[in-house]
Image (cartoon, rainbow, N blue to C red):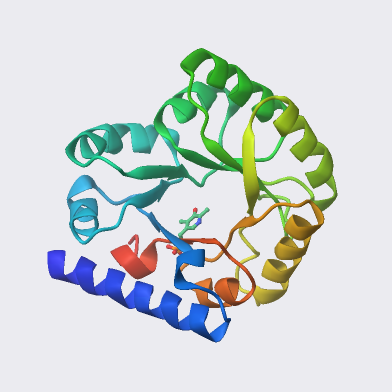
């Protein structure tokens, strides 16, 4: 399995570098977050051994179960929360994660601010935008971004950019382009967009962080 992980990581990094070159971007412009949700520590360790340092999870509780031990083994790992966050989990999230990609409403901003004050930790944050206006999905409306951004900053959150998950089963590129425009309009430079099936398009359209699970770990079964 160790060799598998190594090969997959090298393949994804090669593809990212190739697209960066095509897009006229420096390879270092785009960072890779390995999304390890549903995979256990034994599946994660080979990627750490291969040099990967940024990892993402979508559930606070699952991350609390496996990451403290992994973090103790290897210094310098950066942990990202990419899934919906309930306000009552804000303190646990702030305590464990270095970056939170799913800030999308006033009540959560207030809870995160309180958690920051209590823990003394200040994770970098992304505002999540519901870019396809899908009823079941997290994220704020595109029109809410300026007000939420102002509110988050006033509350002391370190908002660095925007995150989105485009609608499934449709061409993602127009949504990536739209997210990039909203970020530009709001003076935000970081764009968390692109997953296993569409990260090349995302990089072409300005992604600065791609979140990749399946292409690194294999299918989640
Ligand atoms: C699971 C997940 C990913 C990774 O998806 P893959 O298709 O497995 O690469 C990226 N972003 C979010 C928010 C996710 O929940």
Left or right: 124 in relation to 180: left
Residue 137 versus residue 1: which sits nearer the camera? 1
Left or right: 188 in relation to 32: right
Q: Residue at x 54, y 19 (%)?
A: 115
**As drawn, 54 above or below 104:** below
Q: Tell which residue pokes out farthest to the top in this image.
A: 118
**As drawn, 29 above or below 11:** above
**x, y percent for residue 175:** 71, 68
**x, y percent for residue 10:** 28, 73
Q: Is residue 5 visible?
A: yes
Q: Is residue 133 visible?
A: no
Q: Tell which residue pokes out farthest to the bottom in this image.
A: 22
**As drawn, 171 above or below 106:** below
Q: Residue at x 41, y 49 (%)?
A: 56
**As drawn, 92 above or below 2:** above
Q: Residue at x 21, y 46 (%)?
A: 41
Which quarter of the figure is the N terminus placed in? bottom left
Which quarter of the figure is the C terminus placed in? bottom left
Left or right: 125 in relation to 37: right
Q: How many numbered discs, if any?
A: 0
Q: Residue at x 76, y 52 (%)?
A: 187
**x, y percent for residue 87:** 59, 26
The answer to which quarter of the image holds residue 85 is top right
**x, y percent for residue 109:** 67, 28
């Amino acid at each position: 399995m160790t060799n598998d992980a190594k090969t997959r990581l090298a393949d994804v990094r090669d593809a990212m570098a190739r697209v960066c070159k095509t897009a006229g971007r420096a390879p270092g412009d785009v960072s890779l977050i390995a999304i390890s949700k549903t995979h256990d520590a034994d599946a994660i360790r080979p990627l750490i051994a291969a040099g990967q340092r940024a990892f993402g999870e979508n559930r606070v509780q699952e991350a609390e179960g496996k990451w403290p031990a992994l973090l103790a083994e290897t210094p310098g790992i950066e942990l990202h929360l990419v899934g919906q966050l309930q306000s009552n989990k804000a303190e646990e999230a702030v305590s464990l994660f270095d970056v939170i990609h799913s800030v999308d409403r006033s009540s959560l901003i207030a809870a995160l601010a309180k958690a920051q004050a209590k823990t003394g930790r200040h994770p970098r944050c992304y505002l999540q935008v519901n870019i396809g206006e899908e009823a079941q999905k997290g994220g704020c409306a595109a029109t809410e971004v300026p007000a939420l951004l102002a509110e988050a900053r006033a509350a002391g959150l370190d908002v660095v950019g925007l995150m989105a998950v485009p609608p499934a089963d449709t061409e993602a590129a127009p949504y990536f382009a739209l997210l990039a425009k909203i970020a530009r309009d709001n003076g935000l430079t970081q764009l968390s967009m692109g997953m296993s099936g569409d990260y090349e398009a995302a990089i072409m359209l300005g992604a600065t962080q791609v979140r990749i699970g399946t292409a690194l770990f294999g299918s989640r079964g």
